[in-house]
Image (cartoon, helix red, strand yellow):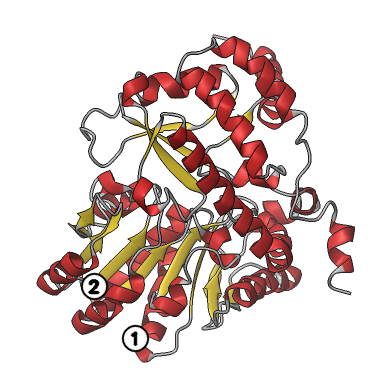
Amino acid sequence: MTDMPEIVSNLIQASKKHEQYRSEECINMIASEGIKSPAVSQMLDMSHDLATRYAEGENDMAGHVKKRYYQGQKYMSQIEDLACDAVKNLFRTSWADVRLISGTHANTATFKGLSLASKNNKMVVTPLSCGAHISHDYTGLAGSILGIDNINHVYDLDEFNIDPDKSAYVIRAAKPGIVTFGGSLFLFPHPVKELKAVCDEVGAYVAYDAAHVLGLIAGGQFQDPLREGADFITASTHKTFPGPQGGVIMGSPDTPAKEKAVKKIQHAVFPLTASSTHLGRLPALGIACLEMKIFGQQLATQIVKNAQTAGQYLCENGVKVVAEKKGFTRSHQIALDVRGFGGGNRVAQDLEDASIILNKNLLPYDDQADKGNPSGLRVGFQDVTRRGLMEGDVKHLCDLMLDVIKEKRKPVQVKADVLAFKKEFCGVKYGFQSVEEALKYVK
């Protein structure tokens, strides 16, 4: 057995190496990861004591602290209320819950709360094979933990989206308590507006998982789910939304049915699924909301431009990019089919060896049982955009990727060029460099 001093020494060294590796020695294109500004990171560093505290209790219909069961809460309650208000202000909602510690936790509480409110254990979801998050699926928390019965939307592979007409038929036939939109492989806005009426017709709540696209929604560059008919949004706060790791649920309980749902969701947050709610992230969440209020439109616009530019450029250079006829994407990510170049597993590993980090991904038409050998790659542009890459820079990055994909050069040879290119983009744009800079915008 390894001695404790050796374990700790190795742990410290591995942590240092990781920080250097992911911040300085590679280019990150994982679609589910974001990058914090110096101000958000500084705010996290200023919240060490808060990160050790507990705040169990009930919230009111504004998402504010109503009752807590611990002492010492006077500033903690203010912080939670203010973080909640920052989210509500940014997304123009009257209620939010910021206690969630992840997007999956937000889904857990929302699906449980809505199934209790509707007294209906059925949920219509995007098929897992077509981009839904595992938390939506019968094999994940929705089915295996919450016992929710899943019925799939009909998915149109030509459109790479939910088929609204055929899904309307499914919703009418299934009469679910919940209809869910959103996902992880998420290229185009989902047909919330088109299916809202049929959801109302059968009495289903509409939930929208915005984990991947929350920053694009904040910047007005994807779709506006709440104005299109979603009753509730769930999300992570650390993907295209450039905040600390965490989750959020939001909506506007403007009907008795929604008020009932909020109460059930809040009960599902506490006491059903949370005790400690990781309060140390909340001040940083507020800073990120301010950043998105000021820089969000510019950031989101450039993220989408960069993703579309990469899709077009890679396609023109012989790589199959899905949804070509639709312009490849309207979000922060594109999907590549690299079967002709050895498959997603081979290409993702070679790109990693060249210090370009992205993930292999099953495509809807793949054999879903063969998870180790997918056809696809999922490529995200939120990190590189915040580093300052514009369309011309993205094309150069694509050239480096193409050298690896087409095996023009060995990954180790490409890596030298990747690291040199990385050095040109060391800062973080579209945000504050310090908390003091952020304060200048609010004085």
Residue under the point 30% across and 51% down = 160
Residue 115 placed where, x, y %?
28, 70
The image quarter in which residue 438 lies: bottom right
Question: In this view of the protein, can residue 12 be seen by the observer?
Answer: no
- Percent of width and height locating residue 249: 49, 67
In the picture shown, does residue 338 fall above or below 146? Answer: above
Residue count near mark 1 (Cα–Cα under 10 Å), binned few <14, some 14–19, many ≥20:
few
Q: Tell me the kind of residue under disc 1.
A: Ala
Q: Quadrant of the C terminus?
A: bottom right
**Residue 6 versus residue 433 in the image, above or below:** above
Nearest the camera: 45 or 200?
Answer: 200
Callout 1 secondary element: helix
Q: Please report whichever mark, 2 or 1, sits nearer to the chain's N-terminal start.
A: 2
User: Is residue 170 in view from this perspective?
Assistant: yes
**Residue under numbered circle 2:** 177
Quadrant position of residue 118 = bottom left
**Compared with residue 145, is residue 205 higher up or lower down, i.e. above or below?**
below
Residue at image coords 56%, 31%: 398
Give the labeled residue for mark 1: 257
Q: Nearer the viewer, residue 258 or 152?
A: 152
Q: Amino acid at mark 2?
A: Gly
**Which residue does the image show at 23% across and 59% down from the upper left?**
148
SS at badge 2: loop
Could you tell me residue 250's position as x and y percent?
50, 72
Contact check, label 2 and label 1, Cβ < 8 Å: no
Q: In front: 143, or 186? A: 186
